[in-house]
Image: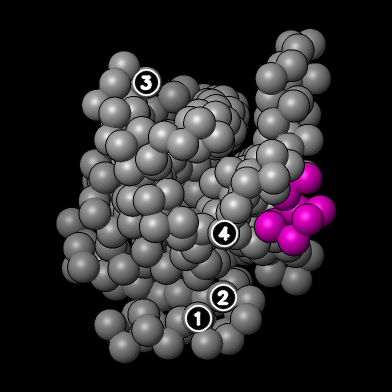
């Protein structure tokens, strides 16, 4: 069934999500804070909104995919037309697919409940290439009935859709996944740096890693770029540091020590402090190579 849906936030992930929805035959409206990001989507049939609150005039469902908690709060909680409590949004569904703090998410949930807006948390696991290949994983939480009403729409974005329960369960699961991704990235960087220090060729090493017990979809996604020394961002060091910060905040709130994650946070910050913040978070390898005195990208 086709749905009128708006996508707000046209970074790499938001744009890929909008493309999937257009391809699936939905009527898609789009918005981005900076102009120009919507041009390619408009050429494919999307309608460009002038402001976020206009989404409810055209769409039954609004998807937000923004950079951080502040951006979500600006869109959802603004007093002059925030999506969570806009009068025109009553009875409609707001789906946030960003990775944001549970605290801000709870504020959005409270405003949505007061305004009669259905609210679903649906963070994702995957990069833009994964979205376009149709392999995205989506973790959703909120009211069961709200999830059921948009499940088919979510499956048009990515086939691996999981309902995690009520409240912000999906937020915690996403943060737990990302701390594993960040930790794996650092271990992969250390694996390469160690092997190359002893004149092992990277292509041979990664061929074996990819066929070994430590291989994973994430590791396999990174083999091609690592062979090419390509650190074009699919998810930047800066954004990964933000997610690790959120994981550590949630851990502190739950009284759980995350010692390895704390170290990875420091290493990601070192990437940012040395000019690697906008590169892909596998720039952890560049940082390590520099420290070791090895040649790096």
Q: Is 35 drawn above or below residue 15 in the view shown?
A: below
Spatial separation of the CA atoms under disc 2 and disc 3: 39 Å
Name the N-terminal-most of marks 2 and 3: 2
Tell me if label 4 and label 2 are in contact, CB under 8 Å: no
* Relative depth, front residue between 34 and 21: 34
Which residue is identified by label 4?
A: 297
Q: CA distance from mark 3 to mark 1?
A: 38 Å
Q: Residue at x 33, y 43 (%)?
A: 203
Which quadrant would the C terminus be assigned to in this image?
Answer: bottom right
The quarter of the picture where residue 212 lies is top left
Q: From what the image shows, is residue 69 above or below residue 86?
A: above
**Left or right: residue 195 compared with residue 281:** left
Disc 2 designates what residue?
32
Q: Mark 3 sits on what residue?
A: 214
Residue 265: tell me if it is visible.
yes
- C-alpha distance separating marks 1 and 4: 29 Å
- Give x and y (percent) for residue 248: 74, 27
Secondary structure at badge 3 equals: loop
Residue 37 located left or right of residue 107: left
In front: mark 1 or mark 4? 4
At horizontal 62% and vertical 81% (from top left) the residue drawn is 34
């Amino acid at each position: 069934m086709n749905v009128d849906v708006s996508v707000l936030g046209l970074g790499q992930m938001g744009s890929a999500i909008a493309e999937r929805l257009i391809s699936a035959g939905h009527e898609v409206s789009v918005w981005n804070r900076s102009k120009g990001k919507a041009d390619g989507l408009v050429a494919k049939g999307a309608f460009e909104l002038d402001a976020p609150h206009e989404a409810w005039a055209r769409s039954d469902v609004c998807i937000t995919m923004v950079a951080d908690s502040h951006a979500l709060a600006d869109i959802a909680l603004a007093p002059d037309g925030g999506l969570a409590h806009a009068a025109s949004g009553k009875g409609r569904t707001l789906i946030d697919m960003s990775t944001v703090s549970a605290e801000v998410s709870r504020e959005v949930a409270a405003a949505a409940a007061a305004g009669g807006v259905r609210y679903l948390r649906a963070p994702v696991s995957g990069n833009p290439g994964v979205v376009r290949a149709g392999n995205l994983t989506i973790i959703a939480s909120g009211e069961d009935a709200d999830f059921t009403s948009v499940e088919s729409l979510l499956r048009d974005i990515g086939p691996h859709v999981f309902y995690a329960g009520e409240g912000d369960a999906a937020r915690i699961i996403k943060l737990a996944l990302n701390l594993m991704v960040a930790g794996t990235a650092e271990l992969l960087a250390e694996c390469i740096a160690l092997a190359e220090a002893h004149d092992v060729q990277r292509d041979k090493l990664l061929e074996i890693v990819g066929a070994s017990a430590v291989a994973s979809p994430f590791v396999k996604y990174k083999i091609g770029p690592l062979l090419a020394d390509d650190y074009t961002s699919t998810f930047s060091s800066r954004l990964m540091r933000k997610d690790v910060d959120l994981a550590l905040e949630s851990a502190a709130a739950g009284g759980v020590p995350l010692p390895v994650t704390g170290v990875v946070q420091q290493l990601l910050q070192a990437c940012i402090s040395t000019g690697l913040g906008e590169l892909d978070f596998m720039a952890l390898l560049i940082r390590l190579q520099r420290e070791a005195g090895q040649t790096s990208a």
